[in-house]
Each structure stands twice: as C-alpha cells, then as structure tokens.
Amino acid sequence: MRRWKRQLAGYVCAADLGDGKPVRACRIKNMSVSGACLVGLDPSLVSSTLTLHYWDRGQVKRTCQVIWTDARHIGLRFVGPRRS
C-alpha cells in the first residue's frame, strides 16, 4: 500500500537534467505529495537527480531523486521544498 495517494495529473512539464542542455519536455503521468511518475522522456538520459518544472497554480520547480525507471516511465521522489 502506498503511503500517499497518487492523483492522475497529465501536466506538461520540463525536466532539467543538469547536463547543460536545454530542458526537455515531458509529461507528469501521476503525482503524490512525495513524488511523481514521468512519461515522454528517455530514461537512459536521466541520472540520479533532476529538476522538474511544471505549472500548478503558478510555476513550480522541484528537485527530484530518480527512484526507478522502466522502458517508458521514470519514478521520482521530491527532495526538499517546492520552489517558485
């Protein structure tokens, strides 16, 4: 059983992989208080952390730790507070 309930999100977002390249567009499939699941981003490009940019009643940035990946999804845990 999950600690926090996940909500379907469908947010268009951008991932800053910290590699000096422009942010990459992707989508948040679902989200909870503690993390999110991304689709539309090649998991082989992602290291152990990234910064996620999305819009939720204002622009939000979240530092994220990559917890798991499969062929199409990236599971993230939010690290630290939500930033504007």
Image (cartoon, grey):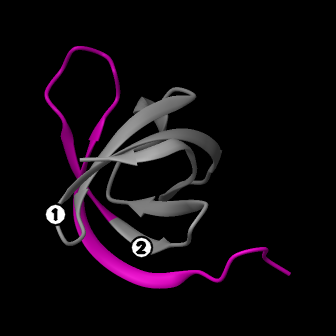
Measured from the top left, where is residue 15 in percent x and y?
Answer: 29, 42
The magenta span reads 1-27
SS for tag 1? loop
- Determine the CA span between mark 1 and mark 2: 19 Å
User: Can you tell which mark lies on residue 7?
Assistant: none
The residue type indicated by label 2 comes to Lys
Residue at image mark 2? 29
Q: Is residue 25 found inside the magenta-colored segment of the image?
A: yes
**C-beta proximity under 8 Å, tags 1 and 2:** no
Write down the residue under mark 1: 58
Residue pictured at 18% horizontal, 35% vertical: 23
Q: Indicate the quadrant where residue 33 lies.
A: bottom right
Residue 41 to residue 34: above or below:
above
Q: Is residue 52 left or right of residue 1?
A: left
> Would residue 45 be found to the left or right of residue 3 on screen?
left
Corner quadrant of residue 10? bottom left
Q: Nearer the viewer, residue 69 or 78?
A: 78
The x, y position of residue 63, in whole percent, is 44, 38
Provide residue 65's location: percent of width, then percent of height.
Answer: 58, 38
Classify 10 Å Cα crowding around label 1: few (below 14), some (14-19), many (20 and above).
few
Q: Amino acid at mark 1?
A: Gly
Residue occupying image coordinates x 37% and y 66%: 28
